[in-house]
Image (cartoon, grey):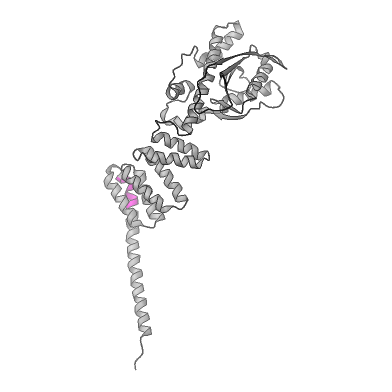
């Protein structure tokens, strides 16, 4: 591939791609292979794959760095490949691939900056939406657990830099071709993973449980999509049982209280307490609401004592709260008696002052 800096080693292919639902749109998917994971000025990018869905399938372009002296042509060709896309997607690219590319751009004394379209890091989405289901979040494990695909990888990731070093030292291309195939398979996986993540973000997965809805609600809320986050948390709460449903209900309650909907928050906590009877957090939250927001320590004390009877193993954690509420109720009773007594005295004195004087 000719560039103003010389010829870049380049190859491309178009492979069949089934219709993506939902369609990610005009996105360039990028995966790079480097000489190490340390980053910094000594780490080179020696291979990059760019995948873009087109009308007739998936166009996969691969760039290769035959020798470090051809880096300028390699970087220029890579930026030209991702330039037409409206978006850029990577897997851990925000923390590794893009910073390394920016560093190499500067080290190669290229003009301007390594510019690109708006970027989405699929690893961030995987962690937000699937962390509760995954022991690890590397791409191979995500392929197996999220996409249901087990790759027949010709070369493990840890050996990819060694394949390039062998090529530079001895000109051997056997392991190098396996490394490039590894790079190609990585970028193809990103296309399918992005579509799957978009479906999860829309709440369109039919097998979502309370944990899934809770993860989605938290992510949507943090990203500013309040309506979508609220809907996802409601769906999680609707499962009624389990820790995730209770957690979602408590998050909704907190937001209701901030909005001043105290009665609605109390009704939700009452329903949660009847559903998640073994979740101490729900009883504590309701006791707090009754004590501080509804100014009803008597009812709060009842909630705490019922929770102690219902969860004897956790009764000790509630004992301090129960004792404090009991003192508060007793003081309130004493204060009420004192106020009633003082009121009666004032009424009697007023009657005496207003009584007609008789000689």
User: Is 298 rendered above or below residue 53?
Assistant: below
Identify the residue at image location x=33%, y=59%: 329
Residue 19 is situated, as x and y percent measured from the top left of the image, at 51, 23
Given residues 26 and 140, the one toward you in this image is 26
Position of 171 relative to 68 (above/below): above
x%, y% of residue 136? 44, 25
Q: Is residue 318 a member of the stretch shown in magenta? A: yes
The stretch in magenta equals: 315-322
What residue do we see at 57% from left, 15% from top?
Answer: 14
How many numbered marks have been drawn onto this rendered protein structure? 0
Along the viewing direction, whichever of 123 and 56 lies nearer the viewer? 56
Spot occupied by residue 344 in the image (x, y as percentages of width and height) = 34, 75
The answer to whether residue 316 is left or right of residue 63 is: left
Give the image location of residue 24, x and y in percent.
54, 28
Q: Is residue 326 visible?
A: yes
Camera-nearest residue between 75 and 317: 75
Is 181 covered by the magenta stretch?
A: no
- Residue 33 seen: no
Residue at 38%, 37% (x, y): give it: 244
């Amino acid at each position: 591939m000719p560039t103003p800096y010389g010829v870049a080693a380049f190859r491309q292919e178009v492979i069949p791609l089934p219709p993506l639902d939902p369609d990610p749109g005009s996105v360039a998917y990028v995966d790079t292979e480097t000489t190490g994971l340390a980053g910094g000025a000594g780490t080179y990018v020696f291979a990059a794959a760019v995948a873009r869905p087109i009308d007739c399938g998936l166009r996969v372009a691969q760039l290769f760095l035959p020798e470090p002296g051809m880096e300028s042509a390699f970087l220029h060709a890579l930026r030209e490949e991702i330039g037409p896309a409206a978006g850029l997607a990577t897997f851990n690219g925000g923390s590794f691939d893009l910073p390394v590319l920016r560093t190499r751009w500067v080290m190669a004394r290229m003009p301007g900056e390594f510019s690109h379209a708006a970027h989405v890091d699929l690893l961030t989405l995987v962690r937000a939406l699937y962390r509760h289901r995954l022991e690890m979040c590397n791409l191979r494990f995500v392929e197996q657990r999220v996409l249901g695909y087990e790759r027949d990888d010709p070369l493990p990731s840890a050996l990819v830099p060694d394949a390039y070093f062998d090529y530079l030292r001895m000109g051997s291309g056997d392991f190098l071709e396996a490394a490039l195939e590894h790079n190609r398979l990585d970028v193809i996986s990103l296309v399918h993973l992005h579509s799957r993540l978009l479906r999860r973000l829309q709440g369109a997965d039919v097998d979502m449980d309370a944990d899934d809805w809770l993860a989605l609600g938290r992510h949507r809320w943090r990203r500013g999509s309040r309506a979508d986050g609220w809907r996802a948390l409601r769906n999680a709460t609707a499962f009624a049982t389990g820790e995730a449903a209770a957690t979602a209900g408590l998050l909704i309650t907190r937001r209701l209280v901030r909005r001043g909907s105290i009665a609605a928050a109390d009704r939700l906590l009452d329903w949660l307490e009847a559903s998640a009877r073994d979740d101490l957090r729900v009883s504590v939250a309701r006791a707090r609401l009754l004590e501080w927001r509804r100014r009803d320590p008597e009812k709060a004390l009842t909630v705490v004592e019922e929770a102690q009877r219902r969860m004897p193993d956790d009764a000790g954690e509630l004992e301090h709260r129960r004792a404090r509420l009991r003192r508060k109720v007793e003081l309130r009773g004493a204060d009420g008696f004192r106020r009633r007594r003082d009121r009666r005295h004032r009424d009697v004195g007023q009657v005496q002052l207003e009584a007609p004087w008789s000689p």
